[in-house]
Amino acid sequence: MLFEYASVGAFFLIAILFVFGALLFGRLIRPNRMYSKKLETYECGEAPVGQAWFNFNPRFYIVALIYIIFDIEIAFIYPVATVFKQWVTQGMGWFALVEIIMFIGILLIGLAYVWMKGDLEWIRTLRSDRRGPQDVRSDGSHPNALPETAPQEI
């Protein structure tokens, strides 16, 4: 039994040595001449425009996350949907249906929350100040506002 583990370990060691040997061999035989064109960003043969590092708008990430969440939802529901007919014949049809509805319901609650929060709007409008008239003093300041002058020492 120990011999079986040793053969697996030997193959693993040979694989690691092969990878690092190929990397080392490539480093030894390739030319190492650096010049400015090698350091430029490659844009499919076009002349590079601007910097290589730039920030994406966070809206793209929100849309991507929502897509991934609902894509994973399909991946989780598909196996249940494939055995649903079998569960109906076993008398577990209502249980499976309630399980699917609850799962979709929880995801729809999350979608409604994101929607109500305004995270799905591509162009967001600035929300007005939510302070009511009871929160504003007669001089126009807010009761929780910080003083504009430093406190005096006594």
Image (cartoon, helix red, strand yellow):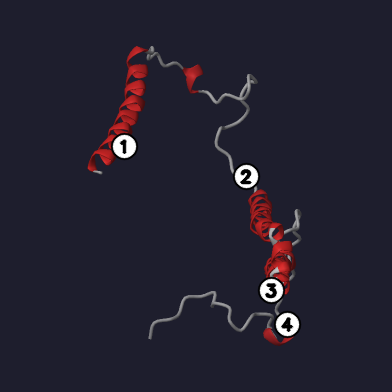
Q: Nearer the viewer, mark 1 or mark 2?
A: 1
Mark 1 vs 3: CB contact within 8 A: no
Label located before the other in sequence (2 or 4):
2
Secondary structure at badge 1 equals helix
Three-letter residue code for mark 4: Gly
Three-letter residue code for mark 2: Phe
Distance between the alpha carbons at the discs numbered 4 and 1: 72 Å
Three-letter residue code for mark 3: Phe
The 10 Å Cα crowd at callout 2, few under 14, some 14 to 19, many 20 or more, is few
Mark 1 vs 2: CB contact within 8 A: no
Residue 56 bears which disc, if any? 2
Seen as rendered, the residue at the extreme left is 2
Which quadrant is the N terminus positioned in? top left
Residue 132 bears which disc, if any? 4
Which quadrant is the C terminus positioned in? bottom left
Q: Nearer the viewer, mark 2 or mark 4?
A: 2
Secondary structure at badge 4 equals loop
Secondary structure at badge 3 equals helix
Q: Position of residue 119 (x, y in %)?
A: 70, 60
Label located before the other in sequence (2 or 3):
2
Task: Give the residue drawn at x 45%, y 80%.
Answer: 151
Label located before the other in sequence (4 or 1):
1
Location of residue 72 (image quadrant): bottom right
Q: Nearer the viewer, mark 4 or mark 3?
A: 3
Q: Position of residue 46 (x, y in %)?
A: 65, 20
Distance between the alpha carbons at the discs numbered 2 and 3: 44 Å
Label located before the other in sequence (1 or 3):
1
Circle 1 residue: 8
Distance between the alpha carbons at the discs numbered 1 and 3: 46 Å
Task: Give the residue drawn at x 35%, y 12%.
Answer: 29
Query: Against 150, is 52 above or below?
Result: above
